[in-house]
Image (spheres, rainbow, N blue to C red):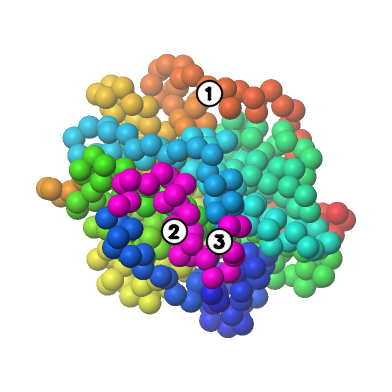
């Protein structure tokens, strides 16, 4: 399988080249030349398969031409040491809890898969691979822990100072070893711009081998497609898979794009809803057909504080640039901090279920957007304890911190403070 750039001005790449480069030379995002539809027999029996078995079948369709079956199966099974249950909330609304991995966030699967795939492709190389990752919250912790101790790889996590939760910050600033945290005096978009600029700087690329572990990397975002096939399988077990609508809290749009890939592979999802916080760039695009990125604003749902979603380019590529087709298949919603807090409180008071701020956007979008006869599944992206201060304040309580998170909080913060100017960041890397 070859991969093309969404900008259309770079040579096609192999999977190994796309994974190691991260970003195409023309600053575009890599896309597979084609998507293989899985056979109907797979969907007919999917509810009899384990999460690992489902994921291996999907991975084979995506990567099977480039990785021997036994090797790919080992990568998938090593990645997935945990399940992702579907939980009934109320009425015709369910949630798929994607926070049962090592850092209690949905990005664990993509990060762990990429770490293993990059290690597989780089096993015979003698040159250190340097992973640059910008984070608005959960990406940094998932990538840092996914790559922790991986031989031949060093990770640099760029995060906006004061704009991630204390627990999120602990998960990537306390690890040491081959993980370096860079505290950037700016917003997430500044961190993402620094990463993209680094890939385009010839002097830096001559000095060190660079790749990205943000969802711009095909090896990070594509494995997230596993979740959507798993959700369908679990809903089928419940007899609720017909007319299934999936709602995805969306920031950089890697997660929902993975779900859309699943749909193009034949996954029987009726439609998708992209739930935004106040950073409503995609929502406005759906209404107007005009994509107008703008500086991100800080919200309760900080991992979605993105003003120029990178993966919008992949959405355009999937639908061949047709606003009409995109708007016909993907609905949008946008919520203020007050609405997010209201939803968390109301849901807890009625059902006893504790939403995190991102999941609250997904739940509310289904409440307001489901039609008669539709079954809704929203993606619960992270454990609410990762946003303990915010959730406690909303609920007037003291939610329990899981042992996995408590372990991170015992570490000592290690970070390097940098400005948002590229030259300062570049000089830091040149000195490594």
Of tags 2 and 3, the one toward the viewer is 3
Work out which residue is located at the far left of the displayed protein and give it: 372
Whichever of labels 1 and 3 marks the residue nearer the N terminus, that label is 3
Whichever of labels 1 and 2 marks the residue nearer the N terminus, that label is 2
Q: Main secondary structure of the magenta part?
A: helix
Figure quadrant of the N terminus: bottom right
Q: Quadrant of residue 317?
A: bottom left
User: Mark 2 touching mark 3, by CB under 8 A?
Assistant: no
- Dot 2 corresponds to which residue? 58
Give yes or no for residue 348 being in the magenta stretch. Answer: no
Residue 309 location (% of width, % of height)? 48, 59
Question: In the image, is residue 262 above or below residue 276?
Answer: below
- Dot 3 corresponds to which residue? 69
Is residue 414 something that shows in the picture?
Answer: yes
Residue 315 location (% of width, % of height)? 41, 67
Any mark on residue 402, and which?
A: 1
Secondary structure at numbered mark 1: loop
- Label 2 crowding class (10 Å Cα cut-off): few <14, some 14-19, many 20+? many
Quick check: 299 left or right of 159?
A: left
Any mark on residue 387, and which?
A: none
């Amino acid at each position: 399988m070859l991969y093309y750039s969404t900008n259309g001005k770079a040579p096609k790449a192999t999977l190994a080249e796309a994974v190691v480069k991260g970003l195409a030379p023309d600053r575009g995002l890599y896309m597979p030349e084609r998507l293989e539809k899985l056979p109907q027999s797979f969907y007919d029996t999917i509810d009899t398969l384990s999460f690992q078995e489902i994921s291996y079948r999907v991975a084979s369709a995506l990567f099977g031409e480039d990785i021997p079956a036994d090797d790919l199966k080992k990568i998938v099974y090593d990645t997935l040491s945990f399940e992702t249950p579907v939980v009934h909330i109320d009425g015709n609304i369910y949630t798929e809890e994607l926070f049962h991995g090592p850092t209690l966030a949905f990005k664990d699967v993509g990060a762990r898969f990429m770490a293993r795939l990059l290690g597989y492709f780089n096993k015979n190389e003698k040159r250190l691979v340097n992973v640059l990752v910008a984070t608005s919250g959960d990406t940094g912790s998932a990538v840092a822990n996914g790559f922790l101790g991986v031989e031949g790889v060093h990770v640099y996590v760029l995060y906006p100072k004061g704009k991630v939760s204390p627990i999120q910050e602990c998960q990537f600033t306390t690890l040491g070893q081959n993980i370096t945290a860079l505290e950037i005096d700016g917003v997430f978009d500044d961190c993402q711009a620094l990463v993209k600029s680094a890939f385009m700087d010839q002097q830096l690329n001559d000095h060190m081998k660079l790749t990205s572990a943000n969802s711009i990397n095909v090896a990070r975002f594509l494995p997230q497609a596993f979740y959507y096939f798993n959700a369908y399988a679990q809903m089928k077990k419940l007899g609720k898979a017909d007319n299934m609508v999936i709602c995805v809290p969306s920031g950089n749009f890697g997660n929902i794009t993975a779900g859309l890939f699943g749909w193009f592979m034949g996954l029987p999802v009726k439609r998708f809803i992209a739930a935004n916080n106040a950073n409503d760039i995609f929502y406005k695009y759906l209404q107007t057909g005009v994509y107008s990125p703008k500086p991100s604003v800080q919200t309760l749902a900080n991992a979605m504080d993105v003003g120029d979603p990178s993966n919008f380019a992949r959405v355009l590529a999937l639908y061949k640039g047709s606003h009409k087709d995109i708007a016909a298949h993907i609905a949008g919603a946008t919520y203020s901090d007050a609405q997010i807090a209201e939803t968390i409180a109301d849901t807890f008071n009625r059902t006893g279920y504790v939403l995190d701020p991102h999941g609250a956007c997904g739940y509310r979008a289904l409440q307001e957007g489901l039609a008669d006869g539709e079954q809704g599944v929203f993606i619960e992206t992270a454990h609410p304890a990762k946003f303990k201060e915010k959730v406690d304040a909303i609920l007037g309580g003291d939610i329990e911190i899981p042992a996995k998170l408590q372990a991170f909080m015992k570490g000592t913060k290690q970070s390097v403070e940098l400005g948002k100017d590229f030259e300062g960041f570049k000089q830091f890397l040149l000195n490594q």
